Amino acid sequence: MVGLVEYEISFGRRMVAISFDPEKKKATVGEKTYEIQTTKHGNRILVDLDGKTHNIEIIQGRVYVNGEEQRFTIQKGKPRVLGGKKADAGAKGARIKPPMPGRIVSVDVKVGDQVKRGQGLLVLEAMKMQNEITAPTDGLVKAINVKPGQTVDNNAVLVEIE
């Protein structure tokens, strides 16, 4: 039994909250819910959202949706943005974990750096894709628990921000 999976996807300055329920085959993007079916064909995934098919291809670490290259970052976990409104921020600070297992390509901050929400912290390579892991909140980098070349699982705490 797989539960609800939540993500926040950033396209430049635009952020979208996405939740996916694989058992019910439903995805919620922002405030709209879609029926979703996926079919994998090699490096290509066909995603059917409410009867409209989208072709997603991963070629040499780049993602193309319907033939157009897309640049985005993904944070796995409870989104900060829900339906265009900020989610409850809760306590200040964050323990950043990877969205999936992978290998650290680069660490772009150091302990003591002041970071802004959305700022790149490090790059994680997973499934032949490079994913920029960004700061979920403003704060001070308290700890960096990884180094380039290191392999991590999705329970590892990569960076701590206070």
Image (cartoon, grey):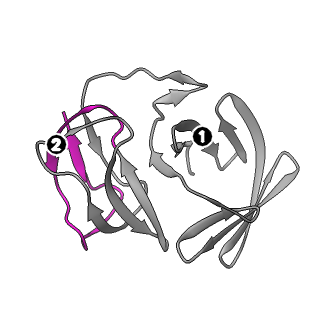
Under mark 2, the amino acid is Asp
* Image quadrant assignment for residue 93: top left
Magenta stretch mostly in which secondary structure? loop
119 left or right, relative to 140: right
Q: How many marks?
A: 2
Q: Nearer the viewer, mark 1 or mark 2?
A: 2
Magenta residues?
135-162
* Image quadrant assignment for residue 119: top left
Percent coordinates x, y for residue 70 in the rendering: 61, 57
Under circle 2, the secondary element is: loop
Q: Which mark identifies residue 51? A: none
* Image quadrant assignment for residue 66: bottom right
Q: Is residue 151 above or below residue 2?
A: below
Under mark 1, the amino acid is Ser
Mark 1 sits on what residue? 19
Mark 2 sits on what residue? 113
Residue closest to the eye, 109 or 41:
109
